[in-house]
């Protein structure tokens, strides 16, 4: 891992991206790394623009904000258009397959994140956990064991198996590319 990895998770309110950011940060801490997580969402709790940002580092984090993320996850067109031009030079953009691939100099990975949650897992609301699995598989910024533990610590009681299934589906999607 680089000394510092910046991740921006973006979409619309209600997609659970803030929880996804918290899970990635907790997984990093479980792995013995340093992590900072921040969030922002529009005036509408559901449907408005939303983003969560995570900084993960092996070193001390001296600046807690994401400035040039190496990873951008976009689950809506609006989120993609808003954030696609502000990445590190080696940045990657992970988009849902429902979004048209942008014209950009960055590497774009298009995966059926929402469709996997809806059709394979049976609940589109776990797309955030599928996305966490994808990011884990592609970046290896946190271990699978730590991210699974963080998911199980953070999801509502009674949904652990559903979310574990979603996480593993995300691992599979990401592994197809790595």
Image (spheres, rainbow, N blue to C red):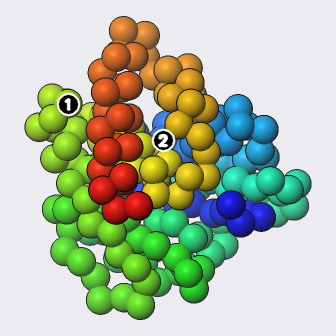
Mark sitting on residue 121: 1
Mark 1, secondary structure of its residue? helix
The residue drawn where x is 88% and y is 54% is 60
The residue drawn where x is 52% and y is 76% is 91
* Image coords of residue 143 (percent x, y): 59, 40
Label 2 vs label 1: CA separation? 17 Å
Q: In which quarter of the image is the C terminus?
A: bottom left
Q: Quadrant of the N terminus?
A: bottom right
From this view, report whether residue 84 is shown above or below residue 94.
below
The residue at which mark 2 appears reads as: 20
Q: Which of 148 and 159 is in front in this view?
A: 148
The residue drawn where x is 87% and y is 61% is 62
Q: In this view, does 99 lie to the left or right of 134?
A: left
* Image coords of residue 160 (percent x, y): 39, 16
In terms of image quadrants, where is residue 101? bottom left
Q: Is residue 92 visible?
A: yes
Q: How crowded is mark 1: few (under 14 residues within 10 Å), some or many (20 or more)?
A: some
The residue drawn where x is 35% and y is 75% is 108
């Amino acid at each position: 891992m680089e000394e510092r990895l910046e991740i921006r998770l973006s979409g619309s309110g209600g997609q659970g991206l803030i929880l996804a950011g918290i899970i990635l940060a907790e997984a990093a801490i479980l792995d013995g790394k340093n992590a900072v997580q921040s969030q922002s969402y529009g005036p509408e709790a559901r449907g408005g623009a939303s983003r969560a940002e995570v900084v993960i580092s092996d070193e001390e984090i001296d600046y807690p904000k994401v400035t040039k993320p190496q990873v951008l996850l976009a689950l809506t067109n609006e989120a993609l258009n808003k954030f696609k031009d502000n990445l590190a030079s080696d940045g990657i953009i992970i988009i849902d397959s429902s979004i048209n691939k942008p014209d950009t100099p960055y590497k774009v990975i298009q995966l059926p994140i929402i469709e996997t949650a809806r059709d394979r897992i049976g609940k589109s609301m776990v797309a955030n956990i599928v996305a966490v699995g994808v990011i884990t598989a592609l970046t290896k910024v946190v271990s699978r064991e730590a991210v699974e533990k963080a998911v199980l610590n953070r999801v509502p009681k009674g949904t652990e198996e559903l979310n574990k299934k979603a996480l593993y589906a995300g691992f599979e999607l990401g592994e197809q590319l790595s």
